[in-house]
């Protein structure tokens, strides 16, 4: 890096660009692949959070922030234990807050997010289902397949071929992650 590069990087930052790849420094093909995959998962997590904002609003602020951060950490294996510990509540309290908000358990929300990240990675023909399962911390590709079936109703291979990123996000949010309608409202309609 040279001194004349600093103002260029600052100008890019002011335009909203948060990451650059410098030729000859970090442009190795493997590194570029990792950067592109990370950016794609980042976009998927933002789409998911945009659609869940209203549903997550009833959660206590600290818990909501921790969950949002966990969902933004695309690909990082997150457990309910980790989310609860970071929010400084015990696992049971965390689960009760989700139940009060009419949301699925935090475990299901985190698993559904992993399926979205898997879908996004599978859009790259260079990744096999086994590669994606390993990258997302699944012990076996079979578990990823089960989660894909649970949260999208498709196998990993089917979701790769039949859904766009927006369709996958919409399907998970509408059929699984949105709060349940109150019984009185459901009976009135």
Image (cartoon, grey):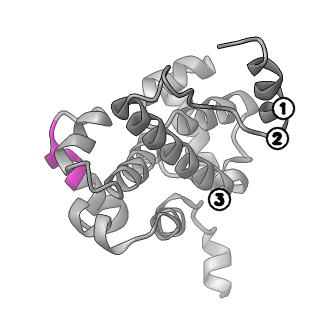
Residue that appears at 18% across and 33% down: 139
Is residue 189 found inside the magenta-colored segment of the image? Answer: no
Is residue 142 found inside the magenta-colored segment of the image? Answer: yes
Q: Are marks 2 and 1 in contact (CB under 8 Å)?
A: yes
Name the spot of residue 186 as percent of width and height, x first. 61, 79
Name the spot of residue 120 as percent of width and height, x first. 41, 54
Residue that appears at 27% across and 43% down: 132
Q: Give the mark nearest the N terminus, 3 or 2.
A: 2
Task: Using the image as rendered, state which of residue 13 and residue 151 is in the foreground.
Answer: 13
Task: Using the image as rendered, state which of residue 49 and residue 35 is in the foreground.
Answer: 35
Q: Residue furthest bottom?
A: 189
Residue on which disc 3 sits: 51
Of labels 2 and 1, the one closer to you? 1
Name the spot of residue 32 as percent of width and height, x first. 43, 35
Q: Is residue 39 left or right of residue 161?
A: right
Label 3 CA crowd tier, 10 Å (few <14, some 14–19, many 20+): some
Which element type, helix, strand or loop, lies under badge 3? helix
Residue that appears at 57% across and 26% down: 22
Which span is picked out in magenta? 140-145
Residue on which disc 1 sits: 11
Q: Is residue 91 visible?
A: yes
Residue on which disc 2 sits: 15
């Amino acid at each position: 890096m040279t001194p004349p590069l600093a103002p260029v990087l600052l100008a890019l930052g002011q335009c909203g660009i948060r990451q650059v790849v410098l030729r000859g420094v970090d442009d190795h093909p493997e590194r570029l692949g990792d950067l592109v995959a990370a950016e794609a998962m980042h976009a998927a997590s933002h789409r998911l959070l945009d659609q869940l904002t209203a549903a997550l609003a009833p959660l206590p602020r600290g818990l909501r922030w921790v969950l949002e951060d966990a969902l933004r950490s695309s690909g990082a294996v997150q457990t309910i234990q980790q989310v609860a510990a970071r929010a400084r509540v015990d696992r049971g309290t965390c689960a009760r807050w989700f139940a009060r908000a009419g949301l699925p358990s935090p475990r299901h929300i985190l698993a559904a997010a992993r399926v979205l990240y898997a879908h996004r990675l599978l859009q790259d023909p260079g990744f096999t289902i086994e590669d994606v399962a390993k990258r997302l911390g699944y012990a076996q590709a079979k578990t990823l397949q089960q989660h894909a079936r649970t949260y999208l109703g498709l196998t990993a291979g089917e979701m790769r071929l039949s859904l766009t990123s927006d369709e996958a996000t919409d399907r998970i949010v509408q059929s699984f992650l949105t709060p349940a309608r109150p019984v009185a409202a459901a009976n009135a309609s």
